[in-house]
Image: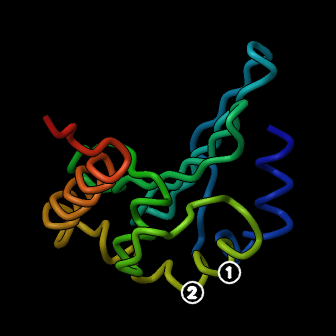
């Protein structure tokens, strides 16, 4: 939990100051070396920060009436940059990227765009799977 809060304070305070994000849920567990998550929302989009032994992850979900799965920052970043080499690492550089792209992300997850956004993000996920696990040739 501490790593999430440190990241938010040091690199993403703009979420609260400029975009009115608020904490809506959190949980911490000491098992498996400690894991935690924090969920923020500003009424337009939810952002979940997850700390596990794999590191710190960031995911997005619409805040509206449409229920959808959480989409990893890597997937959202590929959507925004059209670069399949985009790294969704949660770090200072990507906090700067998030700050610059947050208006677009909020628009992507708006009720007017969410159905199209989900389709496009799922296409990206399928393409990433193909790249990671190409079909075997016989």
Q: Is residue 16 left or right of residue 81?
A: right
Residue at image position (73%, 19%) is 29
Q: Is residue 32 left or right of residue 73?
A: right
Q: Position of residue 27 (x, y in %)?
A: 67, 28
SS label for mark 1: helix
Residue at image position (28%, 69%) is 110
| Quadrant in the picture for the N terminus | top right
Q: Position of residue 90 (x, y in %)?
A: 67, 59
Q: Where is mark 1, residue-wise?
A: 96
Write down the quadrant of residue 133 in the picture.
top left
Write down the quadrant of residue 36 in the picture.
top right
Relative to 33, say whether 76 is above or below.
Answer: below
SS label for mark 2: helix
Task: Give the numbered dot on residue 100.
Answer: 2
Q: Is residue 76 left or right of residue 109?
A: right
The residue furthest front is 138
Residue at image position (32%, 77%) is 107
Task: Give the numbered dot on residue 78.
Answer: none
Relative to 21, say whether 39 is above or below.
Answer: above
| Quadrant in the picture for the C terminus | top left
Dot 2 crowding, Cα within 10 Å, few <14, some 14–19, many 20+? few
Q: Nearer the viewer, residue 80 or 126?
A: 126
Q: Position of residue 26 (x, y in %)?
A: 65, 35
Q: Nearer the viewer, residue 3 or 126?
A: 126
């Amino acid at each position: 939990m501490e790593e999430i809060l440190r990241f938010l304070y040091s690199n993403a305070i703009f979420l609260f100051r400029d975009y009115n994000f608020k904490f809506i849920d959190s949980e911490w567990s000491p098992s498996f070396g400690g894991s935690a998550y924090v969920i923020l929302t500003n009424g337009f989009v939810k952002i979940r920060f997850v700390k596990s032994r794999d590191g710190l992850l960031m995911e997005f979900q619409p805040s509206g009436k449409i229920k959808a799965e959480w989409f990893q920052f890597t997937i959202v970043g590929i959507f925004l940059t059209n670069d399949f080499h985009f790294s969704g690492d949660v770090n200072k550089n990507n906090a700067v990227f998030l700050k610059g792209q947050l208006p677009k992300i909020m628009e992507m997850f708006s009720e007017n765009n969410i159905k199209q956004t989900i389709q496009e993000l799922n296409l990206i996920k399928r393409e990433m799977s193909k790249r990671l696990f190409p079909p075997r040739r016989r």
